[in-house]
Image (cartoon, grey):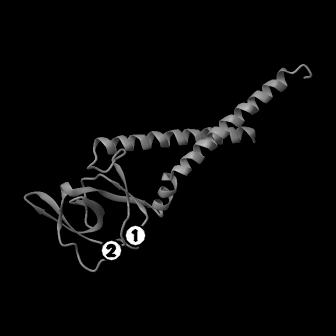
Amino acid sequence: MKKAISVIGNLAVILLVLLCILLGYVKIQTITNPNQIPSVIGYKLLSVLSGSMYPVFETGDFIIVKEEKDIQEGDIITYRIDDSFVTHRVEEVFFENGQPFYKTKGDANNIQDQYTVAVEQVEGVYQWKIPGGMVVFQFFSHPLWWIAAASFAGLIFTVRAFVKLYRNNLRDSPDS
């Protein structure tokens, strides 16, 4: 039982360190390329701000898109229009001068989008979603959570140190 708790504690620490490294990497990308969505091995995390793709995903979900070149009808793509992003389903793929263009539509919308999307505008193809991810993100981005997490980690390390010290003292005591 003690070994299982130790393994779980070590895994939690490793996951926390990896998460911090990942967040640091994303933060560096955000600072060095402020006009681009941060990408980790070609995957990008976005939040859903409208209901245009309901029921596939809802407002407040996170979606993961992957940079891909081969886009087909029926794929859900995220693309840039000026300074905003749109995630809609490809209804039609056509070519002009050998370059692909896409006509898109939100699943909850009645009509196709008014514009065509050039391949250069595409940020990625939808891969999966994290339902309600925005709520979790808001919770974890609150400063009090980070204070609580750091305090909890410090408490775990302190308790482990005292337990180890206590065991060493028991082993080294003259009564044993």
Which badge, 1 or 2, comes first in the chain's sequence? 1
To which quarter of the image does residue 4 belong? Answer: top right
Where disc 1 sits, the SS reads: loop
The percent coordinates of residue 26 (x first, y second) are 38, 44
Look at the numbered discs 1 and 2 and tell me whether their residues touch, using CB distance below 8 Å: yes
Query: Label 1: which residue?
Result: 56
Q: Locate residue 148 relative to residue 136 in the image: left or right.
A: right
Which type of secondary structure does the marked residue at label 2 adopt?
Answer: loop
The picture places residue 132, in percent across and down from the top left corner, at 48, 64
- Residue 146 vs residue 36, the one in the foreground: 146
The extreme bottom residue here reads 110
* Residue positioned 28% across, 80% down in the render: 110
Percent x, y of residue 142:
50, 53
Count the marks. 2
Q: Which amino acid does label 2 sit on?
A: Asp
Quarter of the image with the C terminus in it: top right
Residue 172 lies, with reference to residue 5, above or below; the image says above
Give me the disc on residue 107.
2
